[in-house]
């Protein structure tokens, strides 16, 4: 199962591979069920994983910046 394969959600690199997979499915209606298009499917999975990890790393960096900003702006508690 893949996530949404809409072109606007993915990098141009992944969109090329996704197009190849869809073309393979369209051209080989029956063979796709016995693994004929698996090389494209595996390439799509690898590309989507690479995208996901890149987004995750970017989000971690952004989150750290926000946390640093929040904690730097709060005054120290006084007793």
Image (cartoon, rainbow, N blue to C red):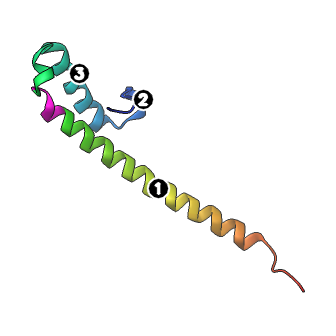
Main SS of the magenta part reads: helix
Q: In the displayed structure, would residue 71 be above or below residue 20?
A: below
Q: Which mark is residue 49?
A: none
Q: Which mark is residue 22?
A: 3
- Give the quadrant of the N terminus: top left
**Residue at mark 3 to residue at mark 2: CA–CA distance:** 16 Å
For mark 1, give the secondary structure: helix
Q: Return the x and y of residue 24 as percentages of the image width and height.
A: 16, 21
Q: Which residue shows up at 31% across the image and 35% down it?
A: 12
Q: Earlier in the sequence, mark 1 or mark 3?
A: 3
Q: Which mark is residue 8?
A: 2
Task: Give the magenta-colored segment's residue range.
Answer: 36-40
Q: Earlier in the sequence, mark 3 or mark 2?
A: 2
Q: Earlier in the sequence, mark 1 or mark 2?
A: 2
Q: Which mark is residue 58?
A: 1
Determine contact: label 1, label 3, CB under 8 Å.
no
User: Is 22 colored magenta in this rendering?
Assistant: no
Furthest toward the bottom, the residue is 79
Q: Return the x and y of residue 47 as percentages of the image width and height.
A: 27, 42
Left or right: 27, with 52 as reference point: left
Left or right: 73, with 69 as reference point: right
Q: Which residue shows up at 76% across the image and 70% down it?
A: 73
Left or right: 38, with 10 as reference point: left
Furthest toward the front, the residue is 34
**Residue at mark 1 to residue at mark 3: CA–CA distance:** 29 Å
Q: Residues within 10 Å of mark 3 (few under 14, many from 20)?
A: some
């Amino acid at each position: 199962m893949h996530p949404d394969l809409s072109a606007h959600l993915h990098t141009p690199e992944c969109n090329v591979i996704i197009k190849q997979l869809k073309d393979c499915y369209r051209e080989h209606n029956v063979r796709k069920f016995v693994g004929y298009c698996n090389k494209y499917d595996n390439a799509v999975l690898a590309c989507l994983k690479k995208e996901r990890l890149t987004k995750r790393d970017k989000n971690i960096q952004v989150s750290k910046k926000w946390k640093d900003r929040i904690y730097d702006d709060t005054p120290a508690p006084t007793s």
